[in-house]
Amino acid sequence: MKKLDSKQHKETPEEELKRLRKRVKQLEGKEVKNTNTIKGLRKELKKKDVQKITMTNEQRALLSHLFPDIDSLL
């Protein structure tokens, strides 16, 4: 077993502040990148969005006759 060295290097408050600021910048960069990715994906989904299907009354009647439970969906 190793003994813990009592003279371990501890960060000074200035070093810790510098390290934390660097980490914050990294995380902010990732957040911006992820936000841009999400915006792009939303645009793609809007492009692929399916238009509402229109049916004639005859088509509705036929579907209702073939699938009685479908009335609640139409």
Image: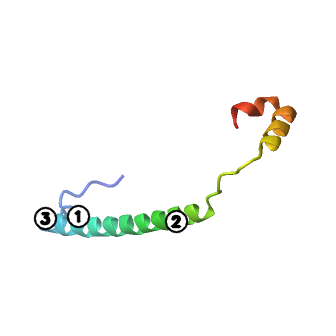
The reply to whether discs 3 and 1 touch (Cβ–Cβ < 8 Å) is no
The mark found on residue 20 in the picture is: 1
Q: Please provide percent x and percent y for residue 5.
A: 23, 58
Residue on which the image places disc 2: 43
Q: What's the residue type where badge 2 is placed?
A: Lys
**Element under disc 1:** helix
**Element under disc 3:** loop
Residue found at x 70% / y 51%: 53
Residue placed farthest to the left in the image? Answer: 13
Is residue 2 or residue 9 the one in the foreground?
9
N-terminal-most mark, 3 or 1? 3
Q: CA distance from mark 2 to mark 3?
A: 47 Å
Residue placed farthest to the front in the image? Answer: 57
Mark 3: give few (<14), some (14-19) or many (20+) Cα within 10 Å: few
Q: What's the residue type where badge 3 is placed?
A: Thr
- From the viewer's perspective, tell me whether residue 66 is left or right of residue 43: right
Q: What's the residue type where badge 1 is placed?
A: Leu
Is residue 21 or residue 11 the one in the foreground?
21
Q: Please provide percent x and percent y for residue 37.
A: 47, 67
Mark 2: give few (<14), some (14-19) or many (20+) Cα within 10 Å: few
The mark found on residue 12 in the picture is: 3
Q: CA distance from mark 1 to mark 2?
A: 35 Å
